Amino acid sequence: MSSAGDMIDDLRDRLNDAADTQVPFATKLRFLNRGQAAMFPRVFKLSQDLTITLATNDFEYTLPANVGAGKVLTVEVESGVASGRFLPLTRYDIIPSLTAPILVLLDTALPSASGSRVRITVANRLDPFVAANYTASQSVTFSGPAGTEELPILYAMGLATARVLDDRMDYTRYSATQVNGSVDPNDIMQVSQFWFAQFELLLDRLQMPFPVSRS
């Protein structure tokens, strides 16, 4: 499985920037994370949570953070306390929220005994890369499906190659010498657009079929 360090190495090679002088390490990592974010919902990871436990006369439960930001696929309830057998929960609603969505049980009685667990399965965003330096990044694993590792790199290349556009458009830096010895702003935009187009092309090919939701 690829690591963040592997992807940094790939970016260094494509940018001819082995020492991170053109694009600093922290910026490379941030661009990779933006690429991962742009992959959702066409590429995702499945997450499950079992921390919600039914409580007497309690019909509203805040979804845990690890599933609250994803697309809910199934909600199941344990047939009894510690039974280990889960059955689909059909009578529920989810109140959306950017911070803490709420699972609402719609019946007047609990769907199982108090103390039974609720299992929630969601399609979630990939885990962001968090690393203080290159050495640390080598142990940070890519959480996406195998074969999709190049997608964040392509997106990061689109962002990285566009970084010099603002400097190029600054009229105080525009001179005959620079015109004769540098690239045209349109060249910069075309290169950046090329990388974003490659990202979209590969994303279309690798997008995952969304599991059927059950409710």
Image: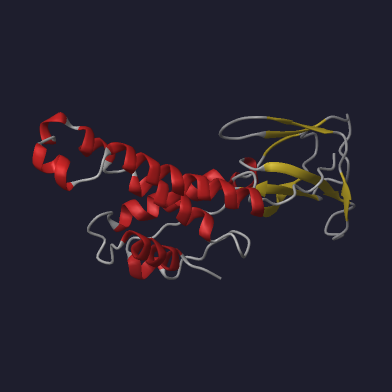
Q: Give 204 or 210, whichever is nearer the viewer.
A: 204
Where is residue 79? Give x, y as percent.
90, 52
- Residue at the (48%, 49%) spot, across then down: 35
Q: Quadrant of residue 61?
A: top right
Q: Is residue 74 above or below residue 107?
A: below
Residue 29: image quadrant is: bottom left
Left or right: 35, with 184 as reference point: right
The answer to whether residue 77 shows anywhere in this view is yes
Height in image: 35 above or below 176?
A: below
Position in image of residue 70 (x %, y %) = 64, 43
Q: Residue at point 41% right, 67% down?
A: 5
Q: Give coordinates of residue 197: x percent, y percent.
A: 51, 45
Q: Is residue 70 left or right of residue 150?
A: right
Identify the residue at image location x=67%, y=53%.
47
**Residue 128 visible, this angle:** no
Q: x, y percentage for residue 31?
A: 40, 49
**Observer-nearest residue: 109 or 104?**
104
